Image (tube, rainbow, N blue to C red):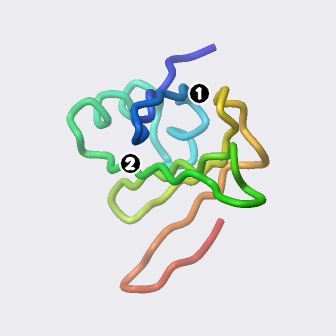
Amino acid sequence: MGRSIAIDLNPKFEIEIEGGPIATALGLDQDTFFTLLEQRKIDQLCERGTEEDEGLYRASFYYENKRARIVVDKTGKPIGEIEASTREKGKRSAS
């Protein structure tokens, strides 16, 4: 298992998810991904599910024109596949 990513939630609650698949979805090797993450060159957003999605969290990672998004449970276990997309000149295309 590779390095994990801590996701900050409000109220303070941490979930760790596997970083390698996120790096791959952004087109980066794992070492570069973590370096950019530590340099705050990769933006992160975590959203908490409500109603039927309560107990789930959607983490999005943005680098240049790419986005990787994953839904996890409170233990960090992925629910479904990572969604990767690329934005070109104001347009977004999922991959």
SS at circle 2: strand
Is residue 57 found left or right of 65 in the rendered image? right
Question: Residue 83 in the image: x percent, y percent?
Answer: 65, 57
| Amino acid at the residue labelled 1 | Glu
Question: Residue 87 in the image: x percent, y percent?
Answer: 45, 74
Question: Residue 74 in the image: x percent, y percent?
Answer: 65, 33
Residue designated by label 1:
18
Question: Residue 90 in the image: x percent, y percent?
Answer: 38, 85
In this orientation, which residue lies closer to the viewer: 10 or 94? 10
Q: Residue at x 54, y 25 (%)?
A: 16
For the N terminus, the quadrant is top right
Q: Is residue 93 above or below residue 95?
A: below
Specify few, some or many for label 1: CA neighbours under 10 Å numbering under 14, 14-19, or 20 or more. some
Residue 44 bears which disc, if any? 2
Specify few, some or many for label 2: CA neighbours under 10 Å numbering under 14, 14-19, or 20 or more. some
Q: Is residue 37 above or below residue 3?
A: below
In this orientation, which residue lies closer to the viewer: 18 or 92? 18
Q: Which sits earlier in the primary sequence, circle 1 or circle 2?
A: 1
SS at circle 1: strand
Q: Residue at x 56, y 30 (%)?
A: 20
Q: Residue at x 57, y 48 (%)?
A: 25
Is residue 14 found left or right of 52 in the rendered image? left
For the C terminus, the quadrant is bottom right
Q: CA distance from mark 1 to mark 2?
A: 14 Å
Residue 70 bears which disc, if any? none
In this orientation, which residue lies closer to the viewer: 6 or 55? 55
| Amino acid at the residue labelled 2 | Gln
